[in-house]
Amino acid sequence: MTGFSAFRIFAEALRGNRGWTPHWRKADPAAHYDVVIIGGGGHGLSTAWHLASQNRGLRIAVLEKGPIGLGNTGRNTTVIRANYLLPSNQRFYEYSLRKWESFEQDLNYNAMVSQRGVLNLWHSDGQRDAHIRRGNTIRLSGGDAELLDAAALRDRYKFLDFDNARFPIKGGLWHGRGGTVRHDAVVWAYARAASELGVDIVENCEVTGFEIEAGRCRAVQTTRGRIAADKTAICVAGSSGRLAAMAGLRLPIESHVLQAFVSEGLKPFIDDVIGFGAGHFYISQSDKGGLVFGGDLDGYNSYAQRGNLPMVRHVCAGAMALMPAIGRARLLRSWGGIMDMTMDGSPIIDRLPVEGMFLNGGWCYGGFKSIPGAGDCFARLIVSGEPRPEIAAFRLDRFHRGHLIDEAGAGPWPNLH
Amino acid sequence: MRIPHPDLGLRDIEEFTYLGDACLCERPQTSADHGNFCDYLYLRDNPAGAHRELWFHEYGDQSWLIVTRDTCTHEILAVEYADARPAGRRA
């Protein structure tokens, strides 16, 4: 498969677009690999591509229980941003955002990376102070944040309910480099680039167990047979707990469902991503015109990939409080994704206590936006065994050491993060 | 989703607040070592299937229930009072 170029698109147009080939090989599993990555979502494929491009000659397989990219990479609201309060989070997400900025050039793929900006609103003096603090820490770390008062916002966002009796809008924190990315294209780009470097992407291959001898993982058992691996890397959004249990481990993780929503297609009126400060609600408009929005977790353990109606109502109530006009739009569909909610709401990228096993999991709200950064850091961890500075805080033992990364300040309650 | 309350019948989940895994009822002694407490606080079995969990009937009779629920289907398999006493005699 040759790369995309303006010339190639032009030439294909003249030839009736008959020259395009599949983006990735449908590989059968080999008997042995240097690295087996479990999970063919954004994180697994990003890890595979970073591994392959940084270590030529390494034999790598990505195992996916169904077709690739049908998990959380295609079930999120496509937002990318780096506007976190805690230094360990901000350092990592800023690293990831910079990789988004070069994503299309690095992968030779149009993923519609759109840095349209992210605005977080505040509604009280206390919230204003918290946003000032957050904005300052973001800028101190080299990121971008700008405080906007209500007067600046009124002109630009005529559809917001500034004078809401309960939650008047008093200002916002603007993060101009944040935005959205076409999520499915991220999977296709990584799959194509990794496959080109020789990575075997093995679909319809579910892992059913691990072969562990003397504390070391030697192979994975799958529905397509035994596959030996020197190193095994777990990248399965929402199912880290299940995989860890197969290796005899318990993790500080609960699996929860998070719903997302899309309205019918409308004319463009929301340019960026807007976050409500008085409830958990955020919204953007896709290039196709649909309003894409989400809010809180359903809040109880679930592997069901579908939510319940009370949360639909809760999120829509937040929407109505922020922008009453949304009440005129029809809700086209809603869906749920299963997320690893950790006990502090932050991810885990680390070696596991079983020799040769690695974990990239515990992604809650941040999974999609972290794909390029986490893939790079995880690939380097798998090779060297040592974490890069960007993920040094995301160790598994931080809970026992007391070094939690609790961005929401909610304590050890996964359903509250 | 509705939860069959032992005394009050089927109630909508909006009447309840979720706490988490019912293993939270088995709190270690205060004399337990640091490791035991950390395991209790942070580690979970997180099963895909039957899961015993704590639900508080906050907008109802204020009882704590242990609900056994299938996390793959949302099916409720069993409901009991967390303190295993009939509602009328609870303090």
Image (cartoon, helix red, strand yellow):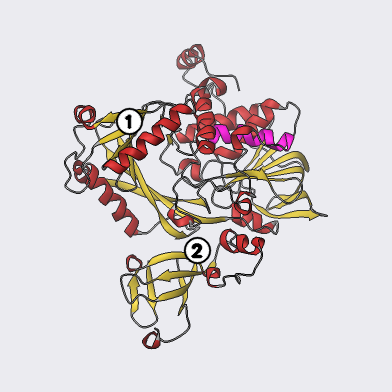
Q: Which residue is drawn at 25% across and 35% down?
A: A266
Pick the residue in front: A128 or A320: A128
Callout 2: chain = B
Query: Looking at this rendering, what residue extends furthest in the front direction?
Result: B31
Tell me the residue that label 2 is attached to: B71
- Percent across and percent down for residue A225 are 73, 51
Secondary structure, mark 1, is: loop
Is residue A374 rendered magenta in the image?
Answer: yes
Pick the residue in front: B48 or A98: A98
Tell me the residue that label 1 is attached to: A272
* Residue type marked 1: Asp
Q: Are marks 1 and 2 on the same chain?
A: no
User: Dot 2: few (<14), some (14–19), or many (≥20) neighbours within 10 Å?
Assistant: many
Q: Label 1, label 2: how many angstroms apart (C-alpha)?
A: 36 Å
The circle on residue B63 is: none
- Percent across and percent down for residue A88 are 54, 37
Q: Which residue is drawn at 48% across and 16% down?
A: A9
Between label 1 and label 2, give the one nearer the viewer: 1
By secondary structure, the bulk of the magenta-drawn segment is best described as helix
- The residue segment tinted magenta is A371-385
Visible residue check, residue A25: no
Query: Looking at this rendering, what residue extends furthest in the top direction?
Result: A7
Q: In this view, does A364 lie above or below B65?
A: above
